[in-house]
Image (spheres, rainbow, N blue to C red):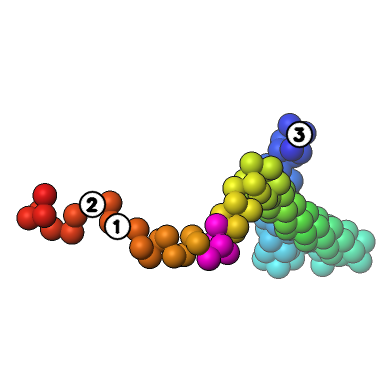
């Protein structure tokens, strides 16, 4: 991720918050004061302003949701690169699978003596 992409996140969240708050305040003040009742032009401007602020709020919420999904996908890709994308990890995984499939490994594990005594009296 570049500095521009990470810098834009707080800006659009602030814009979304401000537009939501503006739409709520404008709708509340219009209902309380009733200044839009003077003419059809003020009523139209009032409703357009509320609709525009609400639209900006919805668009920023969608952008934020998509950004979060993008971060999740990038984290998954990085995890894949660190595990299955790493050649040494894949080699170790193949080696472990070969050891688990070989019949001698299971027999040796059952017949091998324990590394430490089971009780202190045996020492």
Secondary structure mostly seen in the magenta stretch? helix
**Mark 2: which secondary structure?**
loop
Residue 112: image location, x then y, percent: 34, 58
Q: Is residue 73 magenta?
A: no
Labels 1 & 2 near each other (Cβ < 8 A): no
Task: State the extent of the magenta-drawn residues as a range.
Answer: 99-103
Sequence order check: which comes first, mark 3 or mark 1? 3
Q: Residue furthest top?
A: 3
Give the CA separation, mark 3 to mark 1.
Answer: 56 Å
Rendering coords of residue 116 (x, y %): 23, 52
Q: Are marks 3 and 2 in contact (CB under 8 Å)?
A: no
Tell me whether the residue at label 3 lies in contact with that at label 1, contact meaning CB atoms closer than 8 angstroms: no
SS of the residue under disc 3: loop
Query: Which of 39/81 is in front?
Result: 81
Q: In the visual, does 24 lie left or right of 56?
A: left
Residue ID at (28%, 51%): 115
Tell me the CA gap for discs 1 and 2: 9 Å
Residue 30, given in percent of the width and then of the height, sits at: 73, 63
Figure disc tally? 3
Label 1: state its secondary structure: loop
> Which residue is at a point 59% across and 59% down the rendered structure image?
97
Label 3 to label 2: alpha-carbon separation: 54 Å
Comparing 4 with 98, the one in front is 98
Name the residue that disc number 3 marks: 2
Marking on residue 113 = 1
Res. 46 in view = no
Q: Which mark is residue 116?
A: 2
Q: Position of residue 93 (x, y in %)?
A: 61, 52
Kindly identify the residue that appears in the image at 29 percent across and 57 percent down: 113
């Amino acid at each position: 991720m570049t500095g521009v992409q990470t810098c834009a996140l707080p800006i659009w969240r602030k814009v979304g918050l401000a537009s939501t708050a503006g739409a709520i305040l404008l709708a509340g003040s219009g209902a309380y004061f009733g200044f839009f009742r003077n003419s059809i032009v003020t009523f139209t401007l009032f409703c357009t302003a509320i609709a525009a602020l609400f639209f900006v709020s919805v668009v920023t919420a969608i952008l934020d949701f998509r950004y979060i999904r993008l971060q999740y996908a990038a984290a998954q890709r990085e995890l894949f690169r660190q595990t299955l994308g790493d050649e040494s990890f894949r080699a170790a995984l193949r080696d472990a699978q070969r050891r688990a499939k070989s019949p001698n490994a299971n027999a040796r594990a059952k017949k091998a003596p324990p590394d430490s005594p089971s009780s202190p009296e045996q020492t």
